[in-house]
Image (spheres, helix red, strand yellow):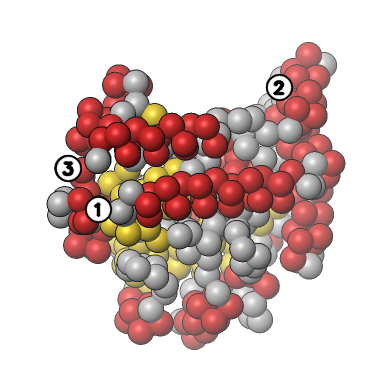
């Protein structure tokens, strides 16, 4: 869809990347690192300064205590962390219970590991976890649960009650839970993000993944991390070693700097994204869409059936020509095609003028 946006000159509300960079101070540290000889392989596990900063971040925000030398690994974005976790923890034939709609890399990396995915579907209009469906998805072959909160693309932020069901099942069936929390700071309306690992009995079985890409608006830097108990983190590191071995030498000191010295940035970003969410969601509502207002992330979902489209794929393929806007048909994130067929995902991590222009174009075309 990004290629379609480029070809047609459409406004790209498809792919989730911000059109403004993160803190200039962080870029300055990266630039200084480049010119001061920080260009050779860093340690595979990540530079000590960044691992310390990640551990301090987890302590400061959530009261999670981590030993930076054994419980933190730096990765090439959350994407590598997800791949390394799946390859490390899933053996051929193992089942992975995973929330759908999915961030695309989940299905690919479960397949690369030879695993079998068991989707639990988040359905419109509320996109909540159904405890019964979750329970039913766990079988004697389940090895791992893969959770994402705040959730892309629905914007659902799992509640403590939902996390408790996940924790209860994980403990009962002795499962490892991999939790993708890349949007941890991007929640709205004071909805709290609760890391799964903070629930009783979960610290020893939870692999937590995050990334500076979303929190600091440097999605192109691809610096992420894995935290968790030393034994699980060591197995993920063993897989990471054969994926990239090591990554982003000059960026790691900059990310460490950001985590330590730009602590307000993610909060300001969340406040600004909340305004953008409202701008886009109010505008789409006025245009007649049924809008599902997200609690977090970069994305809002809408139902397009009111526009005479049963299939959002057809709607999205026609949209660049018709209105000069690109959005994503959410069915591509679902195994359960019926659950996603009528849904469109719109990214609002764009400048307000861009969102206003996109709404004007949609108004003109409707
Ligand atoms: N997980 C989710 C849920 C995401 O939305 C994304 C980015 N779109 C990622 C992981 C990837 O993060 P990174 O860019 O750090 O690899």
Residue 216 appears in the rendering: yes
- For the point 61% across and 63% down, which residue is it? 189
Above or below, 1 against 164 in this view is above
Residue with the mark numbered 2:
40
Q: Give the label on residue 226, or none.
A: none
User: Horizontally, is 340 left or right of 20 in the view?
Assistant: left
Label 2: which secondary element = loop
Tell me if mark 1 has few (under 14), some (14-19) or many (20+) residues whose alpha carbon lies within 10 angstroms of its own: many
Residue with the mark numbered 1:
304
Tell me if mark 2 has few (under 14), some (14-19) or many (20+) residues whose alpha carbon lies within 10 angstroms of its own: few
Mark earlier in primary sequence (2, 3)? 2
Label 2, label 1: how far apart the Cα atoms are: 50 Å
Mark earlier in primary sequence (2, 1)? 2
Q: Please identify the quarter of the rendering in which residue 203 is found.
A: bottom right
Residue 341 lies, in percent from the top left, at 21, 56
- For the point 73% across and 33% down, which residue is it? 23
Of discs 3 and 1, which sits in the foreground? 1
Label 2, label 3: how far apart the Cα atoms are: 48 Å
Of discs 2 and 3, which sits in the foreground? 3
Q: Please identify the quarter of the rendering in which residue 306 is found.
A: bottom left
Residue 167 lies, in percent from the top left, at 54, 79
Of discs 2 and 1, which sits in the foreground? 1
Residue with the mark numbered 3:
314
């Amino acid at each position: 869809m990004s290629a379609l946006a480029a070809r047609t000159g459409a406004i790209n509300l498809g792919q989730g990347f911000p059109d403004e960079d993160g803190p200039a101070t962080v870029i300055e540290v990266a630039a200084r690192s480049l010119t001061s000889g920080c260009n050779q392989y860093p340690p595979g596990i990540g530079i000590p300064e960044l691992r310390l900063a990640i551990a301090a971040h987890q302590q400061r925000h959530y009261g999670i205590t981590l030993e930076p030398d054994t419980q933190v690994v730096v990765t090439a974005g959350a994407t590598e962390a997800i791949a390394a976790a799946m390859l490390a923890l899933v053996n051929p034939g193992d089942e992975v219970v995973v929330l759908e709609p999915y961030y695309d890399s989940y299905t690919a990396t479960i397949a690369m590991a030879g695993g079998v995915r068991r989707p639990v579907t988040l359905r419109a209009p509320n996109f909540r976890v159904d405890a019964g469906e979750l329970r039913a998805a766990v079988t004697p072959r389940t090895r791992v649960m893969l959770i994402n909160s705040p959730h892309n693309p629905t914007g659902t932020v799992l509640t403590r009650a939902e996390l408790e069901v996940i924790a209860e099942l994980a403990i009962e069936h002795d499962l490892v839970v991999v939790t993708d929390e890349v949007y941890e700071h991007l929640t709205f309306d004071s909805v709290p993000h609760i890391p799964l690992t903070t629930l009783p009995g979960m610290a020893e079985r939870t692999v937590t993944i995050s990334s500076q890409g979303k929190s600091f608006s440097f999605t192109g830097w691809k610096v992420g991390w894995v935290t968790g108990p030393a034994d699980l983190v060591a197995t993920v590191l063993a897989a990471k070693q054969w994926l990239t071995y090591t990554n982003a030498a000059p960026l790691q000191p900059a990310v460490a700097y950001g985590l330590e010295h730009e602590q307000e940035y993610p909060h300001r970003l969340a406040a600004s994204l909340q305004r953008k969410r409202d701008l886009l969601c109010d505008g789409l509502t006025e245009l007649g869409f049924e809008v599902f207002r997200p609690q977090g992330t970069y994305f809002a979902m809408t139902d397009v059936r009111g526009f005479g489209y049963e299939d959002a794929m057809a709607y999205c393929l026609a949209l660049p020509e018709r209105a000069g806007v690109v959005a994503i048909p959410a069915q591509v994130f679902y195994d359960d095609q019926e659950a996603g067929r009528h849904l469109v995902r719109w990214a609002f991590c764009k400048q307000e003028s861009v969102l206003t222009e996109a709404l004007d174009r949609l108004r003109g075309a409707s």
